[in-house]
Amino acid sequence: MTTSFPTRWRHAVVTGGAGFVGSHLCAALLDAGTAVTCVDDFSTGRRSNVSPLMDDPGFTLLEANVSEPFSVGRPPDLVLHFASPASPADYLRLPLHTLEVGSLGTRNALALARTSEARFVLASTSEVYGDPQEHPQSERYWGHVNPVGPRSVYDEAKRFGEALTTAESSEHGTDTAIVRLFNTYGPRMRGYDGRAVPTFVRQALDGAPLTVTGDGLQTRSLCYVDDTVRGILAAAAHGMRGPVNLGNPTEITMLDLARWIVELTGSRSEIRFIERPTDDPAVRCPDITLARDKLQWEPTVQAEEGLRRTIAWFRAHQDD
């Protein structure tokens, strides 16, 4: 991936750096000449995601749970807090861990940024909007969230993380930013993590039925990971506090996505409808006016190209 942001950081810490988005962030920063310390406990991240980076002299891997105090050696000038289970399969399996990473982990990452006088970026999520009653969702919308539903461990962890980050900035003057990531997809996703794109791709390549929940008419807005990373680093470089939406404003229904992936893979898989999860959002689409105006950012990778790249990666890693 080619990065377009100016090299302005000497040392970045990426919590959750062995995860899907985190590992792409680590690679982009290294490509731009920034030394990177990746902090991950591998509860959901994978060593294979960062193994290509291990020979880079600027890369350091620290295995640690960020919910407990951790040390990274020399102070960073950028802290990207991306540690958290992010897929339904993970946060439903690790509910307390998810809440701890969003609270204690965010506190510890903020403390590192404060004592190092570093720029801090919190990875939040479109899930803070819950099942939205405003469409598309702008940063001014406060959300429609069930605080005790099965998804609440992730939704509320991220909402609390935003509140903690805001309070830290207000009380201590820490240089913080909040990015709200909408559905991101691409290479290094796990086929069984419960999200639509990897699930459909895996099923199509296996010749299994594609399992579409409900009637499949619920929408998502899919942003290719390279675009998401570019937006995150643009927000870090800009100095804005946020929150700022980063996502693709083009919607697609889950039924259309499943049919498209069947076509792109050349699969003969059928569509099978299954029960829709509790509190599953009916619509999800970002208003990215703020990102366009302040960051001059918008997605550039077309969905078909992004899906082709993702399918190619899954084909090459079917035996992993």
Image (spheres, helix red, strand yellow):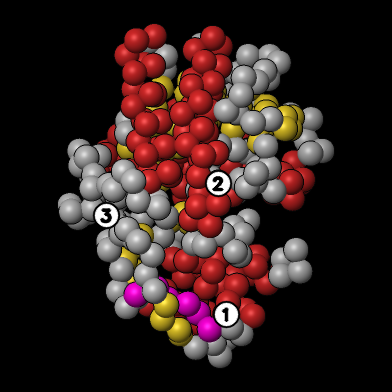
Which mark's residue is nearer the viewer, 2 or 1? 2
Find residue 320 and report its image quarter: bottom right
Q: Which mark is residue 131?
A: 3
Residue 225 visible in the current orientation: no
First-in-chain label (2 vs 1): 2
Q: CA distance from mark 1 to mark 3?
A: 28 Å
In the picture shown, does residue 23 fall above or below 304? above
**Disc 1 to disc 3: CB gap under 8 Å:** no
**Disc sitting over residue 235 in the figure:** none
Q: Amino acid at mark 2?
A: Leu
User: Label 1, on which residue?
Assistant: 204
Residue at point 68%, 14% (across, down): 74
Residue type highlighted by circle 1: Ala
CB under 8 Å between callouts 2 and 3? Answer: no
Magenta-highlighted stretch: main secondary structure?
strand
* Along the viewing direction, whichever of 180 and 70 lies nearer the viewer: 70
Magenta span of residues? 209-214
Label 2 vs 3, first from the N-terminus? 2
Element type where label 1 sits in the image: helix
Identify the secondary structure beneath mark 2. loop
Q: Is residue 228 above or below residue 205?
A: above
What amino acid does circle 3 point to?
Asp
Name the image quarter holding residue 202: bottom right
Does the segment drawn in magenta span residue 211?
Answer: yes
